Image (tube, grey):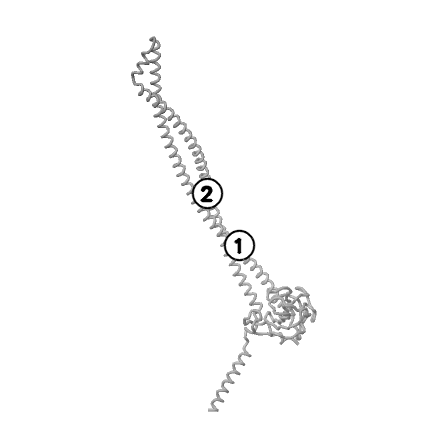
Amino acid sequence: MESRSKKIIAIIIVITVTISSLVLLTPHKSLYCQSLEDELEQIKEERKETQEKIKEAKRQEEQYIQQVSEVEGQLKVASTELGDLNNRLAEVKSEIDKTTIELVLKKQELKKIEDELEEKVEILNRRVASIYKNGKGNVLEVLFKTNSFIEFISRLKLMNLLAEQDSEIIQSIKDKKNATLSIKKTIVDLREKEEEHRGKVEKLVSRAEEKKNEIDGICDEMNSLLSKTRADKNALIRMEKQLEIKEAEVTRILESYKYGTAPSGKFMWPVAGKLTSGFGWRIHPIFGTRRFHSGQDIAAPYGTLVKAADGGQVVQAGYFGGYGYSIMIYHGGGFATWYAHLSSINVSAGQFVQRGQVIGLVGSTGWSTGPHLHFEVRINGVAQNPLAYLQ
C-alpha cells in the first residue's frame, strides 16, 4: 500500500515537472504586451470603423435635416392657416361688434316706432271714443249748423280730411306694427347667425392651434435629434483625428526601429529607487482587473531625476494616455526604452541624448497611484522584462 502511494506521488511529480518544462520552453505570447505592429493594425481598424460611423452619422444627419425641413414647411403652412383663421375670427368679431351697434340702433328705432305707434293708437282711441260718445247725429248736426253754404262746404271738407287722417293713422299703425315685427325678427336672426359663425370659426382656430402645437412638438423633437446626431458626428470626427495622430505616431516609432545597431552592453538604471510592481500579470491597482504589466515600476520621491538608460534618439516625448507624461528613446537595432508617469519632460522628440543624461523628473501623471517611474524595454516594439537588460 505504501509503495503504491509512493508510485502515485512519483508520477504526479514527473507530470508536474514535464508541464513546467513545457511552459518554460514554449514561447507564450500573452507574457508580452501587444507589439507596436499589432497596436498599429488595431488603430487602423478602429480608425476604419470610426470613419464608417462618421459616414453613417452624416447620412443620418442629412435625413434629419430633410425631415426637419419638411416639418418646418408643415409648421409654416400650419402657422399661415392659423394666422388666416385668427384674421377671420377677428373679422367675425368685428362683424359682431358692428352687428351689436346695429342691434342697438335697431332697438332705438324700434323704441321710436313703438312710441309713435302708441301715440297714434292713443289719438285713434280718443277719436273713436268721441264718435261713439256723441253718436252719428252729432256729425250731421255739426254740418247743418252753418250760416251759409260756403261754411257747410268747408266743414264737410274738414270732416272728410279728418276721416282721411283717421284712415292714414290706422294704416300707419298697421305698417309700424309690421315694421316692429320685422326688426325684431332681424335682431334675432342677426344674433343667431353671428353666434353660429363665431362658434364655427373658434372651432377651426382651436383645431388649427392643436395642429400647429403638434407639428411644433415634432419639429422640436427632430431638431433635438439633429443636434444629437451632429454632436455624435463631431465627436466621431474628433476621435478619428486622434486615431490618425496616434497612427502617425506609432508609424513613426516603428520606422525608427529600422536603423542603427543594438546596444553592446546592459542598460543603466534610469532612477534610484525601490522596485515595486514587476513585469508580468498583476491586478491593476486602479481598475482592480487582471492585466499584463509591460514594465518595471521603481518608486522614488516626487521630482527625482530620471536619466537615459543609454544613448539614443528621443522618438516620443509628451502626454501619452494612461502613461501620462512619458518619453521613448530609440537606441538602435530595434531596442527602445520607455519612461512613464513623469512630472516633467526635459527633452523633445528628435533630440539625441547621452547615456545618463537627465531627461525628466519622477511624477504621478496618467494612471498612477503615487510617484514612481514606469520603465520599459522594448525590442522591435515588444515589451521585455527590464530586469534582464539592466546592469
Task: Give the residue at mark 1.
Answer: 230
How many marks can you see? 2
Q: Left of 299 or right of it: where is 203?
A: left
| x then y, percent, for residue 49 | 52, 61
Disc 2 marks a residue whose amino acid type is Leu
Q: Residue furthest top?
A: 148
Bin the neighbour count of mark 2 within 10 Å (Cα to Cα): few under 14, some 14-19, many 20 and up. many
Disc 1 residue type? Arg
Query: Which one is in front, 361 or 261?
Result: 361
Residue 310 picture quarter? bottom right
Q: Quadrant of residue 356?
A: bottom right
In percent of the image, x 31 and y 20: which residue is there? 133
Q: Position of residue 207 (x, y in %)?
A: 42, 45
Q: Tell me if 355 is positioned left or right of 9 in this view.
A: right
Residue 66 in view here: no
Q: Residue drawn 51% across and 56% down?
A: 57
Question: Depth-wise, is mark 1 or mark 2 nearer the camera?
Answer: 2
Compared to residue 274, the image places residue 43 above or below, namely above
Q: Residues within 10 Å of mark 1 (few under 14, many from 20)?
A: some
**Numbered label attached to residue 65:** none
Between residues 160 and 61, which one lies in front from this camera angle?
160
- The residue singled out by tag 2 in the image is 82
For the residues labelled 1 and 2, the Cα–Cα distance comes to 32 Å
Taking depth in this image into account, of 179 and 59 the one nearest to the observer is 179
Across and down, in percent, residue 169 comes to 35, 22
Closest to the observer: 44 or 141?
141
Which tag, 1 or 2, sits closer to the chain's start?
2
